[in-house]
Image: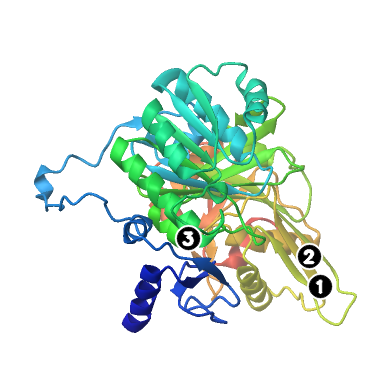
Amino acid sequence: MGAERGKEETLAKKGKTVYVCQECGYESPKWMGQCVCGAWNSFVEEKVPEAAESDARRRGSAPSGRAAKPVPLGEVRSGERSRIQSGIGELDRVLGGGLVLGSLVLISGEPGIGKSTLLIQSAARIAAGAGKVLYVTGEESEEQIKIRADRVCGGRTEGLYLLAETNMEQILAAAEELQPGFLIIDSIQTMYSAELESAAGTVSQVRACTNQLMRLGKGKNIPIFVVAHVNKSGDLAGPKIIEHLVDCVLHFTGERDQELRILRSFKNRFGTTSEIGAFRMEEGGLVEVQNLSATFLEGIEEGTEGSVTAAVYEGTRPLLLEIQALTASSGIGFARRTAIGVDHQRLSMLLAVLEKKAGLWLQDQDVYVNVVGGLRPEGTSTDLAVAMAVYSAAKGVPLARDTLVLGEIGLTGHLRAVGHCDKIAREAARLGFRKLILPKKNAAMMQGGAAELALCPAENIREALQIAGLKR
């Protein structure tokens, strides 16, 4: 490894060509079929700048000759730094309470999902209360941004400055002159540094531009939002090193033909990564969804088999959602298993438990499971709801509309406890539910449940099905 790194440094000094992995950013003096990160055919040819100073800047080292000195931890200022409120409650929730001064936030999402709309709305509100905001666009003209701002901001754009530029040195000079309180880069794949010969969007350019933005933000205490593209699989495009450089990674998801948009954090140095923000896309821009549970449950009808209400705890709030299942006779040699919003391997395990512990034969049945609304809940608290939805669909017996199901299922068929059950119970009672089927361990630990909600503890999957009235 040391020999390879020595070859790279020698090539860099001579201004030769190197090959850079598009997935992880690894540099090699020669082309490789497979990178050390495991990716195949991911290397592209790039030129390395000749100047040693440029190479030092590209790697993120300080240009000044002043040496850094260690500081006693007790003399360092508290990490609880002041935050800037974006004016959008759901965005502040995901960020952990607002924008931290000097933070670098990366936001990604599919084209047309609403990233630029969210940013221009937050930029206008921050400009109205916290000072100047600089919006740098490399994909759209200033006129296009103006049209969008007039539509979603209602003409309230005082303090918001636009810059249509892709040269990073010009952007840094403009930021130095304007001294904004908030900076937006849309998008990082269109930016380039004149110190590098490679084209915009390549690994070296994206890495160098991100490094320059990081130094600007940390040095001037400017919170910076950086928009990034996604690849065909929906993952963040570019080398993984970008995710390590930034302080927060946000992902904006949703379906273009649906109004609901979900903002989720995958990395956050200043808060939790379990929070989600909900928005609804309307003609006038993105509107916050305060009661997300009611949105997911608004289409549930009484007496529908295969429909069960489940609950998860996202960040600081409980979230109720509908899980639907459908079984149909298989017309081919093997039965199909299709899941949307539920892990496919987890579904296979639950079907095996239903067959072994509840006597439900599904070998000749196609099984389809869907989480309504496009949400992908994390954790295992929806196991019991998924199993009940499949059982209800297979037997044609509906579950009562005012019943909520909660619990994890083990391979033995026993129900395991889940977290934050008392808070979920209070939210369920507020939304009109009257019955909660849950593991016995959760029922024994319940301290702050709602009095109007009847707790129905169960030891295993068979007992839970009997309580729900699905198995007699």
Q: Secondary structure at mark 3?
A: helix
Packing grade of label 2 (10 A; few <14, some 14-19, many >=20) is many
Relative image position of residue 97 (x, y in whole percent)? 39, 35
The residue pinned by badge 3 equals: 204
Quarter the C terminus occupies = bottom right
Q: Is residue 387 left or right of residue 318?
A: right
**Dots 2, 1 in contact, CB < 8 A:** yes
Packing grade of label 1 (10 A; few <14, some 14-19, many >=20) is some
Q: Looking at the picture, which amino acid does disc 2 mark?
A: Ala
Real-space Cα separation, disc 2 to disc 1, in angstroms: 9 Å
Relative image position of residue 175 (x, y in whole percent)? 41, 32
Real-space Cα separation, disc 1 to disc 3, in angstroms: 52 Å
Colouring scheme, one of rainbow, by chain, secondary structure, one colour: rainbow
| Residue at x 9% of width, y 50% of height | 72
Quarter the N terminus occupies = bottom left
| Residue at x 82% of width, y 80% of height | 334
Q: Residue furthest right?
A: 331
Packing grade of label 3 (10 A; few <14, some 14-19, many >=20) is many
The residue pinned by badge 1 equals: 365
Q: Secondary structure at mark 2?
A: helix
Q: Secondary structure at mark 1?
A: strand
Instruction: Tell me if residue 381 comes above or below residue 265 in the rendering.
Output: below
Query: If you read the primary sequence from the N terminus, does the residue marked by circle 1 or circle 3 appear first?
Result: 3
> On the image, which quarter does residue 297 sit in?
top right
- The label nearer to you, 2 versus 1, is 1
Real-space Cα separation, disc 2 to disc 3, in angstroms: 55 Å
The residue pinned by badge 2 equals: 394
- The label nearer to you, 1 versus 3, is 3
Q: Is residue 65 left or right of residue 312?
A: left
Instruction: Tell me if residue 171 comes above or below residue 47 in the rendering.
Output: above
Q: Looking at the picture, which amino acid does disc 3 mark?
A: Ser
